[in-house]
Each structure stands twice: as C-alpha cells, then as structure tokens.
Amino acid sequence: MANTYELISSFTVSSPSYSVTLSSIPQTFTDLKLVFSTRSDYGSAGGSEVEIGYNSVTSGYTSTMIYSNNGSSVASASSSNPFFTWGGGMVNGSSTSNVFGNSEIYFPNYTTSIQKSASTDSVTENNGTPNFMQIVAHHNSNTAAITSITLYAWQSFINFVAGSTFYLYGIKNS
Amino acid sequence: MTNPTRIEVNCTTGEETVIELTAEEIAEIEAAQAIFAAQEKEREAQEAADALAKAALLERLGITEEEAKLLLK
C-alpha cells in the first residue's frame, strides 16, 4: 500500500443535482483515486452511466469498456466524445430501493504534463436485471495537470439523488 | 422552470456551491449526450446483428449454445 493515502474531499448529495465538480484539487500527490456511490432519479430499473470530464476540457476523450449487463455474457464498447467519457455505473430510480452503483477511478500521475489516462471498475446493484459490471480504460490527449474532475448523471439531465457520495483520495509513495 | 443544477466542491477550502446551469452549458451537454446516444445506438445494432449471426451459425452447425461453450473450454 502507498505510504500516503489521504482523503482530500468527501461530499454527499443532499439535493438532486445533475453534476458534481471537485475543484481546486491539491497538486501535492502522485495519483488520485475517486470512489463514488451513486443513484439517479431516472425512472427505469437497471443502471445508467456516470460521465466524467477533467478541467472543463472539451476535447480528446477516448475510452474502451468491457462490461456485462446480464450476468452471463461479456461485451465491449469504445467511445470518443469531445466533452466527457464513461466514468462508471449508477443505479436508476426504479431499481431496488436504497441501493447504489459503486465505482472507483484511478488517475495516475495527475500532476504531470503528459496525456492523461485513468481506469474505472464499477458495479451496480439491483435485485433483478439488468445490472452492470464495467472495467473502463480512459485516455485524454490534454497534457495539463488535473485540477478539477466533474461527474455527470447521464441521460437528459437526470440527477444524482440524495445519499450519493463522492470521496477523492490522494496517493503517493512518501 | 429552473435549469438543472450542478454542485461545485472546492477541495482546498471545502466550500460547496449549487449553481444553475446556463443555456450554453445545457447546449454543450446536450451535444455530448447526442454523440453518446448515437454511439450507443450503433453498439446496440452491432450486438443485435452479432446475435443473429450467432444463431444462424449454431443452426448451421446443428449445435446448441451450451454445446458451443463446451467446445470453447
């Protein structure tokens, strides 16, 4: 385990909101880890995507995802979107009550002046189908240090509901 | 009707701010959502085509899906 694994910021949604931005991220660590549990107010069962962007960058995102949504088969998908990329899965409002999607995104070398990569692993919870497990590899060609991260509840301005949580950790080996 | 809101959390000060999205921000997000929706539609069409091709192949081979999985073990 890293010598330093420090909580930078924690936030719990109290009123539904379409996006959460973690800004003014300290530049004193080597890597970042973002852990979030989210549920939306979208009126269907199953899960939706949490989208993620950095620094208000609006170009250069690509990602590849391996996922399963029926418990028996695996599929893959790729995306290139100028505004954001896949961040992880969240549970929709008509799924089993009081359950959330759980995701972790790891951002290595976030302060360096190189193109940025990140990785996600994520699962949604639901006592039924559909359900999702995802592993996502991200890339953005922007070379600026990451100073802010924004997570969006996808699908036509659905919202993160109250109780959705976001924890940002700083990691370094000193 | 009020616009959707975003929340900004300052990781240095801890300050939390709720901000209503501007028309420009909404338009930008809608454009991004349209791109994702088109990619999703394409992916779903490919999945459907693959499922049809798989079913046709299994029929041609005269085996079930479980038998095909056995062969691949």
Image (tube, rainbow, N blue to C red):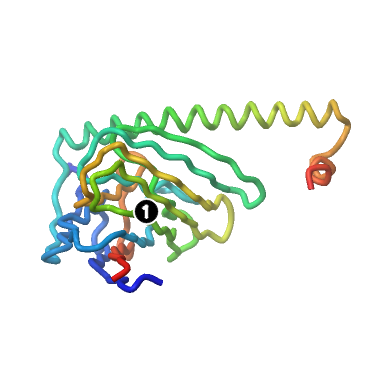
The reply, left or right, for residue A67 in relation to residue B35 is right
Q: Which residue is mark 1?
A: A40
Total labels: the figure holds 1
**Image position, residue A32 (x, y; %):** 31, 59
Q: Residue A137's quadrant in the figure?
A: top left
Q: What kind of residue is marked 1?
A: Ser
Say which of A127 and A109 sits in front.
Answer: A109
For the point 43% across and 61% down, the residue is A100
Q: Name the residue: 18% across, 43% down.
A: B3
Tell me: residue B72, above or below residue B13. above
Viewer-proximal residue among A127 and A78 = A78
Quarter in which the C terminus of chain A is drawn: bottom left
Q: Is residue A98 above or below residue A52?
A: below
Q: Chain of mark 1?
A: A
Q: In this image, B63 relative to A30: left or right?
A: right
Residue furthest to the front: A174
Quadrant where the N terminus of chain A sits is: bottom left
> Residue visible at 20% across and 63% down?
A28
In the foreground, A52 or A152: A52
Along the line of sight, the residue nearer the viewer: A139 or A47: A139
- Counting from the top left corner in percent of width and height, residue A22 is at 21, 56
Tell me residue A34's x, y (percent).
Answer: 33, 60
Residue A18: % across, % down: 27, 49
**Element type at mark 1:** loop
Image position of A18 with respect to A13: above or below? above
Crowd around label 1: few <14 · some 14–19 · many ≥20 (10 Å): many
